[in-house]
Image (spheres, rainbow, N blue to C red):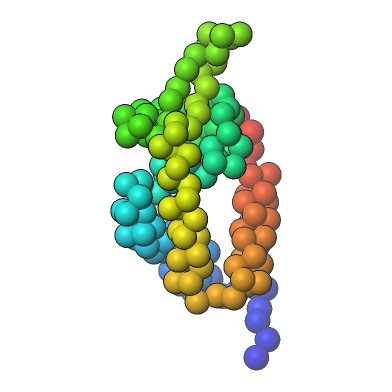
Amino acid sequence: MTEQPPATLPDQDFLRLDSQICFALGAASRAFGGLYRVILKDLGLTYPQYLVMLVLWEHGEMPVKQLGQHLRLDSGTLSPLLKRLEAAGLISRERSAEDERSVHARLTESGTALRARAVEVPRRIATATGFELGEIRELQDRLRRLTAALDSAVPQE
């Protein structure tokens, strides 16, 4: 049986919950969230905090605004994350000497050291998916393409 293009599905099929890509993505996201919660507990990080640490481990010190762009987060969401990471001694924040409006985030010694323990997180996640490495990379590529398509479909305010 050949698959029908989405536009030609009968209305009753098109409006089924299990036909909604947003529901499938949301369910997968919640499942990932639960797995990350368990795995990251040993590191003392939440999933959003882990994402902040990933960016800082990869790129080093940077303005908070740039960090938010990497994570696709606004400052109202990012600031509480950074405060908690700073309280845990993993990062520090300082105003830029050149531009006092700009705040820079950087890893502390403890934050840098945590990277060695975090190396196992992606391996554990990949193993839990049951996917081969090629399948994971293909899925990542498709999700990036989906994100780009959706970004370009949303009118700019």
Residue drawn at (36%, 59%) of the image: 39
Res. 95 visible in picture: yes
Q: Residue at x 50, y 26 (%)?
A: 105
Q: Position of residue 147 (x, y in %)?
A: 62, 51
Residue drawn where x is 52% and y is 44% of the image: 54
Q: From the top left corner, tell me how far across and down residue 143 is, in percent.
A: 61, 58
Q: Quadrant of residue 109?
A: top left
* Residue 18 located left or right of residue 132: left
Q: In the image shown, does 116 or 128 lie closer to the viewer?
A: 116
Q: Is residue 48 above or below residue 91?
A: below
Q: Is residue 18 above or below residue 41?
A: below
Q: Looking at this view, name the residue that lies furthest to the bottom.
A: 1
**Vertical relation: 24 (above or below) 105:** below
Where in the figure is residue 126, as x and y percent of width and height?
A: 51, 68
Can you give x and y, in whole percent of width and height, for residue 68 in the image? 53, 33
| Nearer the observer, 91 or 17 | 91
Assign the N terminus to one quadrant of the image: bottom right
User: In terms of depth relative to the viewer, which is nearer, 33 or 154?
Assistant: 33
Q: Is residue 80 visible?
A: no
Instruction: Give the quadrant of the C terminus.
Output: top right
**On screen, residue 125 above or below 156:** below
Position of 132 compared to 76: left or right?
right
Residue at x 56%, y 24% (from the top left corner): 63
Total number of numbered discs in the rendering: 0
